[in-house]
Amino acid sequence: DAGVTQSPTHLIKTRGQHVTLRCSPISGHKSVSWYQQVLGQGPQFIFQYYEKEERGRGNFPDRFSARQFPNYSSELNVNALLLGDSALYLCASSLSTDYQPQHFGDGTRLSIL
Amino acid sequence: RKEVEQDPGPFNVPEGATVAFNCTYSNSASQSFFWYRQDCRKEPKLLMSVYSSGNEDGRFTAQLNRASQYISLLIRDSKLSDSATYLCVAISGGYNKLIFGAGTRLAVHP
């Protein structure tokens, strides 16, 4: 069975541009969460979606947005990119939202020039 | 103060050594706890859940002390392949939001 899949693997953008990252959860998982990991730090929570509804939002600016589709896949959008947005963006899925461990995709490594 | 705190290390140990990592959390309402392992430039992978009664998985033992808000991971008979960053994780907030520590680096040498 396929695990969590993310695309693209790597991405290079310049300041001011926007980016869309994609995630497909493990089959049967209805919850998708997004995390940002900068070098030397643990992942930081950005969003959680369950059944196409936003269930939680971390301390990130409004430039960050996300959505979940009927097939439970998800997109993370970041507008007006800043140098500080350079990071590994991780998508994780779980069956539901009840204090369960989450399973991560390989991540998208975003570099802002 | 960070919600989950870990000693960043690195811990440099020889093969066969026993090594222990500690982690503290500040939110007493935290419900569930995990240890994840992350290899360099890879995604975090679930190592084990952590229960108050303590739990063991082969060479790995995890323990939770709710009174002290303290979590530990013990690795016995270290292998070269155990070299990685170990992330302490708490869940709180009424939904499945993982709160990560910054990670503890382990380097096992021959």
Image (spheres, rainbow, N blue to C red):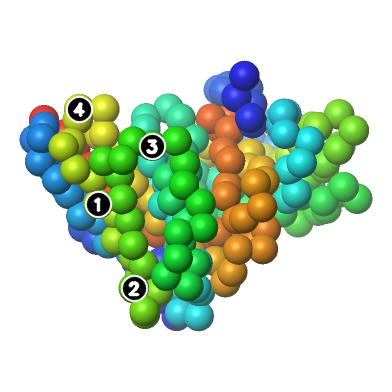
Residue B84: x and y in percent read 52, 39
Q: Numbered disc 3: what chain?
A: A
Q: Is residue B106 left or right of B67 when viewed as pictured?
A: left
Residue B39 in sight in this render = no
Residue closest to the eye, B82 or A98? A98
C-alpha span from label 2 to label 4: 29 Å
Q: Earlier in the sequence, mark 3 or mark 1?
A: 3
Q: Which corner quadrant holds the N terminus of chain B?
A: top right
Q: Classify mark 4: helix, strand or loop.
A: helix
Residue A52: x and y in percent read 42, 70
Q: Are marks 4 and 3 on the same chain?
A: yes
Q: Nearer the viewer, mark 2 or mark 4?
A: 2
Q: Nearer the viewer, mark 4 or mark 3?
A: 3
C-alpha span from label 3 to label 1: 12 Å
Q: Classify mark 3: helix, strand or loop.
A: loop
- Residue for badge 1: A77
Q: Earlier in the sequence, mark 4 or mark 3?
A: 3
What's the amino acid at mark 2?
A: Phe
Q: Are marks 2 and 4 on the same chain?
A: yes
Q: Is residue B43 left or right of B47 when viewed as pictured?
A: left
Q: Which corner quadrant holds the C terminus of chain B?
A: top right
What's the amino acid at mark 4?
A: Leu
- Residue for badge 4: A83
Residue A35: x and y in percent read 42, 46
C-alpha span from label 2 to label 3: 22 Å
C-alpha span from label 4 to label 3: 15 Å
- Residue for badge 2: A69
What's the amino acid at mark 1?
A: Asn
